[in-house]
């Protein structure tokens, strides 16, 4: 028998703002590292930017009366029943 677990989530709007601010700071870091010819800093900025961009598809909109199932590499983590982003 499968039991439904309630997934712990973070509100979407604050997390979207955190990611967008992170992308802005990372672009600033990239430009500053490039101006200083610090190639190690450029590589770090590119890797961090790739990680931040990979987080964006993790957002889901839950409409009223719907639910979303959260999985991680095929393993069931829980269900989100609260509406919103």
Image: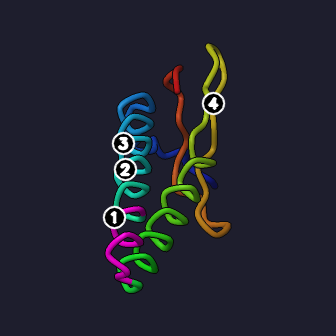
Q: For the residue labelled by badge 4, is the local secondary structure a helix, a strand or a loop?
A: loop
Whether pointer 2 and pointer 4 mark residues with C-beta atoms closer than 8 Å, the reply is no
The residue carrying mark 1 is 32
Label annotation for residue 22 = 2
Magenta highlight: main SS: helix
Q: For the residue labelled by badge 1, is the local secondary structure a helix, a strand or a loop?
A: helix
Label annotation for residue 67 = 4
Of residues 25 and 81, the one nearer the viewer is 25
Q: Residue 19, position in %: x, y?
A: 42, 45
Of residues 31 and 67, the one nearer the viewer is 31
The residue sitting at 45% across, 32% down in the picture is 12
How far is mark 4 from mark 3, CA to CA? Answer: 29 Å
Residue range (magenta): 31-38
Of residues 79 and 33, the one nearer the viewer is 33
How far is mark 2 from mark 4, CA to CA? Answer: 29 Å
* Quadrant hosting residue 11: top left
Q: For the residue labelled by badge 3, is the local secondary structure a helix, a strand or a loop?
A: helix
Whether pointer 3 and pointer 2 mark residues with C-beta atoms closer than 8 Å, the reply is yes
Label located before the other in sequence (2 or 4):
2
Label annotation for residue 21 = 3
Label located before the other in sequence (4 or 1):
1
Other-residue count near label 3 (Cα within 10 Å), few / some / many at <14 / 14–19 / ≥20: few
Other-residue count near label 4 (Cα within 10 Å), few / some / many at <14 / 14–19 / ≥20: some
For residue 47, side relative to residue 36 (left or right): right
Q: Residue 2, position in %: x, y?
A: 62, 53
The residue sitting at 37% across, 50% down in the picture is 22
Q: Residue 5, position in %: x, y?
A: 48, 46
């Amino acid at each position: 028998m499968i039991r439904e677990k309630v997934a712990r989530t973070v509100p979407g709007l604050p997390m979207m703002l955190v990611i967008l601010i992170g992308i802005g700071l990372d672009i600033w870091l990239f430009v500053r590292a490039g101006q200083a010819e610090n190639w190690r800093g450029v590589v770090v900025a590119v890797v961090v930017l790739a990680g931040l961009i990979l987080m964006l598809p993790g957002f889901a909109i839950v409409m009223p009366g719907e639910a979303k199932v959260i999985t991680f590499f095929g393993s069931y983590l829980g269900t989100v029943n609260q509406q919103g982003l």
